[in-house]
Structures are given as C-alpha cells and as structure tokens.
Amino acid sequence: MKKILVVGSSNTDLIIKVPEIPRPGETLLGGEFQTFQGGKGANQAVAAARGGGDVVFIASVGGDTYGEESIKGYKLDNINTEDIKICKKIPSGVAMITISDSGENAITVASGANAELKPEDLDEAEEAFHEAEYMLVQLETPLDTVQKAVEISAEFDTKVILNPAPAAELPDEIISQVDIITPNETEAERLTGVTVSNELDAVKAADILHKRGVKTVIITMGAMGAFLSDQITGVKNLVPGFKVDPVDTTAAGDVFNGQLAVALAEGLPLENAIRQANAAAALSVQKLGAQSSIPRREETDYFLEEQLKTDN
C-alpha cells in the first residue's frame, strides 16, 4: 500500500442546519445543532485513509478536549498521528458552519492551533515526506509552512497535490513546484482571474496555471464533475460527476482530493482516478457533517459498480 502524507488543518465543526443561509443582520430560529470533526487537512487525511491509503497526518491541535477528540478519531481511521503537534496553551481550530436545506453552506473559521504549524515542525518530520508517494496540502495553515512542505517534497521526489483552498493568491515559488493543483471554480478564478462557469472557461484557467509551472490541473466543478488538463498526456477533458440529492456539501472537495491521492498512488490513470474521486465526493454530499460523511472504499467501489450498470 502506497503512503499518503497530508499536511494541513484540524478543526472541530460546529454545525447549525437551517432552512436557508441567513442574510447579514438576520436571525433564524429553530436550527438543529451538531458537532463533527473537520478541517480541510483532516478531512483529506480521513478520506485518503477510508479510501484505502496508508496515511500520515501532520497538523497542529490545541491542548484541549477538541484536540484530544480529533486525535482519537484519526487513530480510529488508522491514521499515523505521531507528527501531530499539540499546543497546550492554544485552543484547537474551530469552524462555525451554517447549512441550508438545499445543502449550501457558509463557514467561518477560527484557526487556533492551526496557525502554529511552523516550517520547522516539518523539518522534524522529513521521514514522512521521504516515504510518501504523494503529499497533499491545502491553505488553512500558514503559507510559509505550505511552501516548506512543497520544498521538502521536491527534495525527496514526492509528488505534490495542492488543493488551493480556501481561495487565495499564491506565489510562483509554490505553484511552480506543484505536480497537481485542484482548485474549484472560485479558487481557479482567484488564481487566474478567469471566471470559470463552463468547460471553455476551465480551459483558459488551466492554461494560465500551466504557464505558471503546473503540469496537471484539475478544476472541480460541483455536480458537473472535474475538468482535467494534463500537459504530460495532452488530455483536456471534463470528467462528469454523478447526479445525487445533496444534503451537505461541506467536505465534498476534501473527499475528492483524499480519494484522488489514493487512486493515483495505486497507479490509476488520471481520468479513472478522477472518476473514483467524483464518486466518493458524490457519496459524501448525501450525509451531514465533514468526516462523518466520508465514505469507505467499499462504498465507493459499490457506487461505481452500480453506476456502470446504469450507464450500460
């Protein structure tokens, strides 16, 4: 089994489900409150682990109940937590998530201990980079830490998947060392200035990212699927998504990235890996919560088998 390294955030999600997202200044009563484990890095680590990967997770949590419970959860998914930093005097990261009946969400994050994941912490975990087939990283930790993760990966010829979320501008020093970048439409626009609403827009945005040094661009486009532009094979193609009734889209992108990393580490061709990642993401949006919604590999495989029967 190929090893997947995830460097990123760990949060606790405090979720309120309401009929619709409130407008500024508006108060909505009657919401349903629940607590789940989350954070983009943690979600992707769990998705990779449940998708069949041998996962090491590098993160920073507080010395509080939220941090303790998070680590317990990762261990239950057989994730290696040896390189998770515990900050005793700083609270763990928390995300306040409002979810509408249609499945849309609004998210506010207090980074807490995530901001304490420093470049030097990665130096102490070089063995994890050396052993990994793929390193998966996002943008909920300090940017200099993200850059350090990319640089160490380059030293060990570990392939880098960058999920540039939340949306942010990135220097060429980071982007030029990335093997695969996986923005959604909003993040692609932030990186390229191109508003992505269809396949033609995705081609334009991908070309700009190629010029900045990324050989493989995958733009996730919700229910439409994911657009692949790969300079190595010359493929420019929309890999269709799956039609499902969404309940909560919170972790769909993270599930996509975690399953993608595993599929690629197993040697699947890019388009096949994306189809598998699309399937895992489609399953996740049908349940409430982030990590609570992440499917296991057997669920994703079964879903794909059923879709194949339908297609035929």
Image: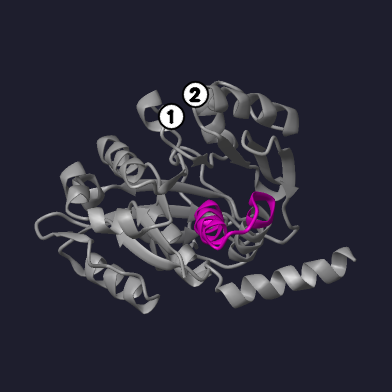
- Label total for image: 2
The magenta region covers: 251-273
Query: Which amino acid type is shown beneath numbered disc 2?
Result: Arg
Depth check: 248 or 155 in front?
155
Residue 289, how many percent across, how many down? Answer: 49, 64
**Callout 2: helix, strand or loop?**
loop
- Check disc 1 and report its element: helix, strand or loop: loop
Q: Residue at x 37, y 41 (%)?
A: 139
Quarter-of-image position of residue 169: top left
**From what the image shows, is residue 236 above or below residue 39?**
above
Q: Which residue is mark 1?
A: 176
Q: Which kind of residue does numbered mark 1 sit on?
A: Ser
**Horizontal arrangement in the rendering, residue 206 relative to residue 15 (left or right):** right
Which residue sits at x=47%, y=64%?
A: 48
**Residue depicted at 17% across the width and 53% down the height:** 124
In the image, is residue 169 above or below residue 37?
above
Report x, y in % for residue 9: 33, 52
Snapshot colouring: one colour
**What's the mark number on residue 212?**
2
Residue found at the far left of this picture: 89
Distance from disc 2 to disc 1, alpha carbons, whole Å, reads 6 Å
Label pair 2/1, CB-CB below 8 angstroms = yes
Dot label at residue 199: none
Does residue 111 appear in this view? yes
